[in-house]
Image (cartoon, coloured by chain):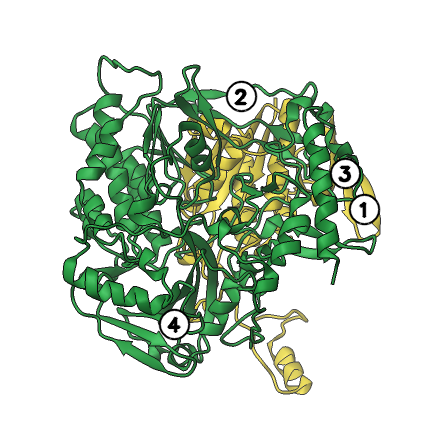
Amino acid sequence: MSRVLVGVKRVIDYAVKIRVKPDNSGVVTDGVKHSMNPFCEIAVEEAVRLKEKKFISEVVAVSCGPAQATETIRTALAMGCDRGIHVEVSGKDYESLGPLQVSKIFAALAKKEEASLVILGKQAIDDDCNQTGQMTAALLDWPQGTFASEVEITGDKVKVVREIDGGLETIKINMPAVLTADLRLNTPRYATLPNIMKAKKKKIANVKPADLGVDIVSRACRGTEWDTVGSLYEQWRSRSEHGALVF
Amino acid sequence: MFPAGRYSIKAQRCMRVLRTVQAEHALPQLYACRQNGSSAVTPRITSHYTICPRDKDSRWEGVEMERFADEADVVIVGGGPAGLSAAIRLKQLANEQEKELRVCLVEKASQIGAHTLSGACLEPSALSELFPDWKERGAPMNTPVTEDVFSILTKKHRIPVPMLPGLPMNNHGNYIVRLGHFVRWLGEQAEELGVEIYPGYAAAEVLFHEDGSVKGIATNDVGIAKDGSPKDVFERGMELHAKVTLFGEGCHGHLAKQLYKQFNLRENCEPQTYAIGLKELWVIDENKWRAGRIEHSVGWPLNRNTYGGSFLYHLNEGEPLVALGFVIGLDYTNPYLSPFREFQQWKHHPFISKTLEGGTRIAYGARALNEGGYQSLPKVTFPGGVLIGCSPGFMNVPKIKGTHTAMKSGMLAAEAIFPKVTAEDLASETIGLHVPEYEESLKKSWIWKELYAVRNIRPSFHNYFGLYGGMLYTGVFYWMCRGKEPWTLKHAGLDSDQLKPAKECTPIEYPKPDGKLSFDLLSSVALSGTNHEGDQPPHLTLKDDSVPVAHNLAIYDGPEQRFCPAGVYEYVPLETGEGMRLQINAQNCVHCKTCDIKDPSQNINWVVPEGSGGPAYNGM
């Protein structure tokens, strides 16, 4: 049968007051309470429910980050996932890890694990990017059902009810597909102590992005400032080739 | 003003009716109807199953209440210095003697150290016994004490008091630590040794064998809605059975409270007396930072009859950080006193504000602490379990240090329990092991000597001269005689009995917070990072919902709205217009336990909320 990849992100707990580091290089994370991104919890719950309804056979929880990310995977395992994959990214690499790099990792894993569904949270509460699911689908050239508030599988098609600005939109997409979970999709179950104890015996594989053939170097360039629109236009004209902007 | 006198007579009639109706247990939704004969309906506040039993509640019919159970050799409740030291010592002994030992530790905070709050100035004696190589292991002890300053504050001035060696407050050789980080480090050492640590799971219930000995604990149920009904995600807690259970819940633990009654552990000691400690962390101007400096003060803003004082420690952890706070004895008599606002006011004293000016506050928290010392030590062993740490209360009050004694008590418990738990033939009278050897080893240890020597200092404050009488006593008897005087002074009794009625006291006018040095309560609570799942029964349970308005508000003007450092209790007008009701904002709770201690009607019973809830302290 089919396999589902679920992405879980370890983020600073929503109730904690964040503090900017004295050197303004980022946010203080050392010792701060972290927990699983709430939308990722909803994604895990949906995947586990699909498994319980026997639409899929295996749920694999994936997290990208430093060593502590395994705690988040452990919680996902306690909620019912079968095994975990920890993609180890730490230090400076982790600070610059963004949706583009994460989606490349997920795309590579989805192909490697032959997943028929990738379920992610719609966004993370620390960066609010709302990009990883969409980018992953684009890299895999798979259909996407984002902001899902209802998911129904029939055969090899998925009916997704999406929460959009205008209301609710229902779409039917083919599997394999990428889904992102919105708030009203379900109420996640608790990770109870007996399940945490059982989860200690489940496997978490450790891989590096390089093992998956993914280059996570961030190429975000610094912007430049111009005084007037005229000077911007001049720069643009002088650098364009065949009408395309080249920097 | 509302008619206090007329109210209480009607309320008393209600309570008489309630007592007769009590046998016939009404369903929770009809609770409000019980109040026949009262002019005001008390809205229902408490829905927790410890007050409203589920076996008589129709909403719980058919719900699976069976619990999963697991066996360990030793179960430890509480991941603080005592619990972790006990766990580490047990595993050290097991590894030395090559014996198998399963040690499980449950902690209600989401991570080890998240509910830990203390000054703190650590005496490394117990740590050196536990880990002689603590420095190589990277213990976060980065700030040796370099200077020690004691002052008596008046409104504008400061009287320096010399710190003579031999005085209990002298700190030479000690370290200023961020106890949360220290506890986190202890947790890492424990896990390396093989202790199973489960943060995020609170021990909610003590389990008993048929012979009355302790069988273990059960963790909290999850998925109960605010009105007490089961949600879809409801799941029972888990039972952890053990040969011996160690209870290290810290000051005024809620399971310990039950155990005192169950096993009559307090029949030969004085009631415990407490203080509330409020603390903040500030990043200050580099030029004002003097790492290793300790400042203590007494006096302003407290009057001479209210026990309390302040601390301000300069940490050496990279950035110019100071830990500061205020401690007030919970035997204070004026119901208008607000420990939080006294603390905020104190920061404006010129001697303090000169350090804080230009700085930023980055953390806030509060916790009750023990002040009873030697006189209030209960029996600490009972069939199936023992009490360790601040739960029975080994704090050395004049030194204001309890961590080293808590750690030592955990270690002594481990050393007493280990041979019994690993013995091949367990010839025990009770199914749960009784380990009276622990109490004997405590009495022979330096904890006992230390507590005995300082036993008279705290109670010496109960005299007409209050603070000054106490300081005189300390100077004469402790400094000269080291506590060898043949008498033992008594405490004043239960803290909850000390409040005078509001009409006999003067309301205190506190200055408004200025937003730079002093702050309002709610922004402070936000800094503690505290949160709880909103849809659960409030864990501040009331034995009788009508008592707060009828008694606390009527006689004492609702002291809980002032002593709670998190703004949990508020008296708000009833929607119907007439009268007031108590609103419990359980989500704000920082688990300090002050309400359970100081409530004059002893009506509030703090129980543990769903695990992971509570403050998110980082290195407090």
Q: Provide the chain ID for the residue under circle 3.
A: B
- Quick one: which chain is yellow? A
Residue under the point 45% across and 32% down: B261
Measure the alpha-carbon separation of dots 3 and 2.
36 Å
Q: Is residue A230 visible?
A: yes
Q: Position of residue B73 (x, y in %)?
A: 33, 23
Q: Is residue A217 visible?
A: no
Viewer-proximal residue, A157 or B535? B535
* Mark 3 or 2, closer to the camera: 3
Pointer 4 with pointer 3, Cβ within 8 A:
no
Is the residue at mark 4 from the same chain as the one at mark 1? Answer: yes
Measure the alpha-carbon separation of dots 1 and 2.
44 Å
Q: Which mark is residue B67?
A: 2
In screen coordinates, is B479 left or right of A202? left
Measure the alpha-carbon separation of dots 4 and 3.
47 Å
Who comes first in sequence, dot 3 or dot 2?
A: 3
Q: Quadrant of the N terminus of chain A?
A: top right
Colour assignment, chain B: green
Q: Which residue is mark 1?
A: B39
Measure the alpha-carbon separation of dots 2 and 4.
53 Å
Measure the alpha-carbon separation of dots 4 and 1.
46 Å
The kind of residue tagged 2 is Arg
Say if A207 sits above or below B221 in the image: below
Q: Which mark is residue B35?
A: 3
Q: Which residue is mark 4?
A: B299
Please identify the quarter of the rendering in which residue A32 is found: bottom left
Q: Which mark is residue B223?
A: none
